[in-house]
Image: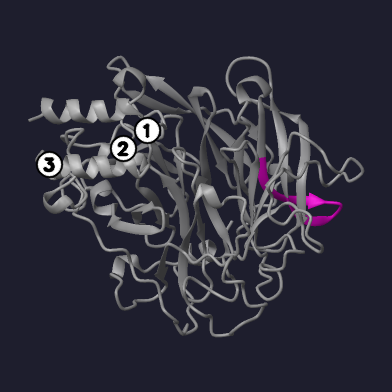
Amino acid sequence: MLHRFVIGVAGVVLCLGCVRAGAQTPPAPAVPLPDVAKADIVVTGLSDPVMLTSIPGNDAYLLVAEKRGRIRVIKVITKPDGSLGYELDPTPALDIKATTISTNNRGLTGLAPAPDFATSGLIYLFHNTTINNVGSTVVARYTLMPGPGVIFDPASRAVIWSAPAGLYHHGGTVKFGPDGMLYISKGDEGDEVFSARNPGSIYGKMLRIDPTRDSYPNDLTRNFAIPAGNPYAGRPGSLPEIWALGMRSQWQFSFDRFNGDFYLGDVGEIGWEEINYVPAAAAGQTKDFGWPNWEGNALPPWGVLQPVPDPATLIFPIYAYPHTPSAGYEQWQVGCSVVGGVVYRGSAIRALSGRYLFADVCNGQVLSLVQTGSATREFQNLTPMLRDIGLPTERAPFNAITCLGEDNQGEVFLVEYLGGRISKIVPQGVQPALADVAGSGQTVGPNGQLTADDIIVYLNWFFAGDGRADLGGPGQSPRPDRLLTADDIILFINSFFASR
C-alpha cells in the first residue's frame, strides 16, 4: 500500500515548506453538473478492501482484493424489476494470508483477470511476500478451479515477476492494457534519491510485460517476455520491461476503455499530489514523469537529485493539488494521498460520460475532469452530488477511498478501505435528455434545454474523436460501443428532435 496512505488515515499530513515553481493551476470549472448521480452502498462486510475489478466476459461476478491476502467475490444478481443487486460471497475465491506480508502498507494490492479469462481461467495478483527469506513484491498467477462459482486453486501458484521490497512505496497495481500486455506499477520503495529515474533500477517505474511467454527460461524469478514496443528495450544499462519512469508511489492506474489513453495517480512526498496522463498514441515513446526532480509542477526543496530530464520525454501532470492550503485551491482540494481512477464510459449517467473520476484517501473527495488531447478542463467536485450533501438523504462521508473500479458495462464503484464498503455510482432523479449536452454559448453540461448549442457541441465532439460522442452501436442501439460512427450522429439527431 501507500506510505502516504498510512500517514493519511492516521490524520497526519507532512509538509516541509515546499517551494513551488510554477505550481499547477486547477482547470477552469465547467457549468455545475445537475444532480444526476449518487453513491449507493451496495456491499458491506469487507476487511480492508483495496481493489475492485470485473471479470472479462463474465457479468455475474466482481472481484475484490483485501489487503491482508484474500480475494472476495461479489455476486451480481438481477432483481425481478430488472435492477441489479450485489451480494458478498462468504467464501473467498482465494486466501493467501499465510504467505502475504500485510503489515504497514504492505499486502495484497492488485489483481487482474487475464483478457481470455473465459477460456484460461487465469488471474494475476500483486502482493508482498518472502522469497528465500527476502521481503519481496511479486506478481503471481493462479488458475480457476473447475466447477460453479469463482474459486482459484492455491496449488496453481506461479510467480511471474518479483523484486526486493522495502517498507513502503510499493505501487502495487496490475492491469492488462488494450494491447493485451500486463502493466505493473512499482513504486520507488522509499529510495527517493537514486532509483526512480534510473533506467537500470526496477523502482519508481511502470512496467509492461507479456506473461504468456518466457524470455528467461533459466531465471526462475523472471517468467515473462518483453513485448515489442517497450521504449527501453535494447538500451544498454536499461531494464527492457520499463514502460515509463520517474514515479514515487503510483496508486491505481487505468486505461480509458474508449480510446486506450492511460491515467495514473502518483502520491506526493512534500507538497503535491498528481494525476498523470499518456495518450494512447504516445504509448511507445520514452516517458519520464520527473520524480524526484519534480513533484507536480514544483521543484522539491532538495533540488536536482538525478540527471535533468530530457524535455522531450518529461511529462508534467494534467492536474496537481496541494497538501496545505494554497492560492487558487479550495479547502476541499487539500489532500494527502491521491487515488487514480477511471474514465466513465457507462451508459447509465450520460452527464458523466468521458469524465475522469479520481479521489483522495484523506479528504474523502471524488473529483473529475475531462482530458481531450492536451487540454484539461471542466474540473468538478462530484462529492456533494454523490453524497446528497445538504439533503435529507445525505450519506456519511467517504471513508478512505482506495479504488475506483469498473464493471464490464463501464459503471463505477467506490471502494472504502476503513468502512469495508463498496458503493456504486448510480443515476439519481430525472436524467437529462440524450441530446442535452451544452448550455448557452456552448458551455459544456446539460442545462435542461435543447438548442443549436447542443448540436454544435456534439458535432465538435464527434469530429474531434471525443468519446463523449459515443452514444450508440449498430442499428442505433442507445448503448456506447467504443466506436464513433454515423449511428451516433443519427441517434443524437433523432433524440434532439424527439425531445423538443
Amino acid type at circle 2 is Ala
Image disc number at residue 275: none
Q: Is 459 situated left or right of 128 in this image?
A: left
Element type where label 1 sits in the image = loop
Q: Is residue 181 above or below residue 61?
A: below
- Residue at (42% x, 42% y) in the render: 421
How many angstroms separate mark 2 from mark 1 (CA)?
7 Å
Question: For the residues marked 2 and 3, what is the alpha-carbon distance in whole angstroms?
Answer: 16 Å
Disc 1 residue crowd, few under 14, some 14–19, many 20+, Cα 10 Å: many
What residue is disc 1 on? 484
**Do tag 2 and tag 3 residues touch (Cβ < 8 Å)?**
no
Q: Please state if 263 lies on the left or on the right of 224 as rendered.
A: left
Q: CA distance from mark 3 to mark 1?
A: 21 Å
Residue at (78% x, 41% y) in the render: 224
On screen, 301 above or below 207? below
Q: Which residues are magenta?
A: 125-137
- Residue receiving disc 3: 452
Which residue is labeled 2 in the image?
A: 469
Q: Amino acid at mark 3?
A: Ala
- Name the quarter where the C terminus is drawn: top left
Image coordinates for residue 180, horizontal then vertical, percent = 62, 36
Looking at the image, is 157 positioned above or below residue 23?
Answer: above
Question: Disc 2 or 1, which lies upstream in sequence?
Answer: 2
Residue in the foreground of this view, choosing between 311 and 95: 311
Give how far across and how far down residue 32 sits, in percent: 19, 53
Q: Quadrant of residue 104?
A: bottom right
Are dots 3 and 1 in contact, CB under 8 Å? Answer: no
Q: Is residue 48 visible to us here?
A: no
